[in-house]
Structures are given as structure tokens and as C-alpha cells.
Amino acid sequence: MILGFFFALLLIGLPIALVLMVTAIIYIYNTGNTDLFSSLPQQLFGGVESYGLLAIPLFMLAGEFMNEGGLTKRLVRMASVFVNGLRGGLAYVNLIANMMMASIMGSAVAQIAVMSKVMVPEMEKQGYDRAYAGALTAAGGLMSPIIPPSMLFVIYGVLAQIPIGDMFIAGVIPGLLMGTGFIIAVALIGIKYNYPKSAKITLHQARKDFLLGLPAMSIPAVIIGGILLGFATPTESASIAIVAALLIGKFVYKELRFRNLGKVLYSTAISSSAVIFMIAGAKMLGWALIFEQIPQTVAVWLTSLSENPFVFLLLVNLALLVVGMVIDGIAALIMTVPILLPIATDVYGIDPYHFGVVICLNLVLGLLTPPVGSGLYVAAAMSNVGPTAIFRALVPFLTVSVMILLLLIWQPLLVTYLPSIK
């Protein structure tokens, strides 16, 4: 019954955070146990009472400062140094720059919006199909929630009560695998459609672009290095990255204007508060689901189908692929983790880091698939191309992503190795 209310509210277009809260309220009302209403404020605030969640607005703000201060442009130019003269070179630049930005922004939709404005017009000028340019930029955004830092990993770490820093480390190898897979796809597509070689740049210009990009590269170095070496928590690394991006944008590249700080802070506050509000609503709904004993019911049903962990993960991923097509990835994550994680760890003995990376990658695919696909529609709007054309051009990259997902399900060591040696 509670799930019926949820989907009904979702279909009428109510914002997802309110859907989560209203569903919990309706459930309590239907049970007749109105004394539970007095616990709702506690559940609401308890959902966001986590130090780790501070990383979400901080990473968003670091990304905004990088874009406003010209750091993003320098990273793109730096990436072009590594593909000098290659066929389809600008496509490689797009991917490499996206991998660099993925280690900063943490949000796929934000990354797609930023990189589309930078890369799509430039790729079209050099003879690339506009739909392909938009699709490639959107595919690059898929790496943002996997390569640390990741907003999904922060939320999963809070929900699973595991160290967020270790969760970030678990995403390093999967992120590199995705990047490698996408590069292979770009190479094959470039050969098939005979895309132009990138313009050769002089040694002097290459040295200049590389050196100018080094200050911008210090941001991901601060974030990932601080976490890997144990000097800072993810939240502290994000704070340091904000200061570094602000100083570099203002005093090194001299593009950041203090008069624009209000706009940047406002944009970050709006974006991050929507996510935090959703987490608070999910806490209320999760509390109601536990009262309904839905996790226990699902556990019994799944174990009746198979006791094999591999089969369990395949079933979960098939279900989440469907869920991700109709529900935003963050909302889906905070709805499903409280139900599925105890089953994965307690019944099937699956490592929580392995489970987290797998389901986060799965739900990221929903960003680029209809009917919801917020990343797909952002890429279409920024590229001025129809969503259908973008989706067709995305098929090779989605295929690579599914193959990487199956590989991670089959070989959990690809996820768990780095956290185990930290």
C-alpha cells in the first residue's frame, strides 16, 4: 500500500522530496497510530544530522568556483596537449577533460551542463556531428558520480554508515575502467566516421597550456591526495578545494570577480538544499518502510529465488535499471539502500563498498535514459539537439557502461582492493 501511494504521488508530478515525506505521513495516518506523528520531526532532522553530508554543498561550491574562475577552460587546454594530432583528437580532449572535472564536481548533471557549454560548440566548429558532441559530453558526465569525489558516494556512505573517504577510494579503479572503455569507443567511432585529426600545436604552445593547467590540476590533487594520504576527510578536502579554487581563479587566472560571488553562492545553496531536503524526506520514508517490514519481506523473496550473491546482484541491478529510468538517481539511492544493503551484507555476505559502487554506477545510467533522464535532457538543451538524437549517439557509451557494470559485479576485487590496502 505504501508503495502505491508513493508512485501515485510521483505520477502527479509532486517534487520527489515532498513525495517521500507525504508518503510517510499517509502511511502513519492509515495505520491509525497517530502517536508516531510526534517522531516525524526527529526523523526529519535525523536524516541530515551527519557531518559527511557537508561535503555535498562544499564540492558543489568548489565546482562553481572552478567554472567561474576559468579553471575549467585551462583543464580543457591542458587535456588537448595529450592528444596532439590524433584522429578525433577533440573527442579525446572532451573525455580527458571530463575525467579531470569528475575528480572535482561530483555531480553528473552539473558536469554535463558545464562541459556542454565549453565543448559542444568547439567540436561542431571542427566538423563533428552536434548530436555526437552532446552525447560524448553527456557520457563523460557518467564518470562524475564514480571518480571521487562523488555526491552519490557521500550519500551512500552516510546511509551505509561507512567511511566516505574509503568509499571514494573504492571508486578509483571503476572510474578509470570507464574512462578507458570510453576512450576505446571514441577511437572506434573516430575511425568509422573519419573524424578530423586535432590540430597540431607547437612545442612552445603545448608547454604553455600544460603549465597554465597545473594550478587548476591542483584542485583534484588536493581532494584525492588528501583523502588517499589520510591528511583530510572528504569534507575537509572539499573546504580546502574551495579556498584553492577561489585563490587560483582570482589571483592566478584573474577571471573570478568578487561581485559574482553572490550569484555563485546562491546557485550552490539552491542546488545543495534540494539534495539535502530529499535526504531528509527519505529518512522519514525509510522509517515508515521499516515499520511496514518491507526489508524483511524483500529479503525472504530474494533468498527464495537464489542464494548465490552473483545472481542476487544481477537481479538487483535489473530492478534498479528500471527504477533509475523513472526516478532520479539520488532519490532512488536513498530509497533502496536501507532496504537492500542489509540483505546484501547480512544474507549474501557482499562487501558494502562493492555493493555501493555497483548500485551507484547502475543508477547513474538512469541519468541518460528516458523517460526521466535529467542528464539526457540537460545535454540536449545545452547542445540544442533533440533528446532522441542524443540518446542514439549515446548507445555505444551506455553499452560500455553496462559491460563495466557486469565486470564489477563479477570481480568485486576491482572495487575492494584499494580500500583494503589503504
Image (spheres, rainbow, N blue to C red):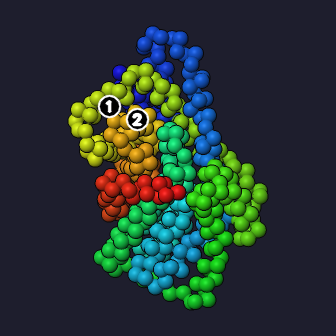
Disc 2 secondary structure class: helix
The relative height of residue 404 versus residue 70 in the rendered view (above or below) is above
The relative height of residue 159 versus residue 247 in the rendered view (above or below) is above
Q: Residue at x 56, y 51 (%)?
A: 165
Q: Distance between the residues labelled 1 and 2?
A: 9 Å
Q: Which of 102 and 416 is in front in this view?
A: 416
Q: Can you give x and y, in whole percent of width and height, for residue 46 in the image?
A: 59, 29
Q: Can you give x and y, in whole percent of width and height, for residue 279 in the image?
A: 53, 36
Q: Residue at x 32, y 78 (%)?
A: 191
Quadrant of residue 65 within the rendered picture: bottom right
Q: Are marks 1 and 2 in contact (CB under 8 Å)?
A: yes
Q: Which residue is drawn at 50% across and 65% down?
A: 99
- What residue does disc 1 label? 299
Is residue 146 shown left or right of residue 253? left
Of marks 1 and 2, which one's residue comes earlier in the chain? Answer: 1
Q: Can residue 379 be seen in this view?
A: no
**For the residue marked with disc 2, what is the amino acid?**
Pro
Q: Is residue 185 visible?
A: yes
Q: Which residue is drawn at 42% across and 55% down?
A: 415
Quadrant of residue 192 within the rendered picture: bottom left
Q: Can you give x and y, in whole percent of width and height, for residue 193 in the image?
A: 32, 76
Specify the label residue 342 is tagged with.
2
Q: Can you give x and y, in whole percent of width and height, for residue 80 in the image?
A: 52, 77
Quadrant where the N terminus lies?
A: top left
Quadrant of residue 272 within the rendered picture: top right
**For the residue marked with disc 1, what is the amino acid?**
Ala
Disc 1 secondary structure class: helix
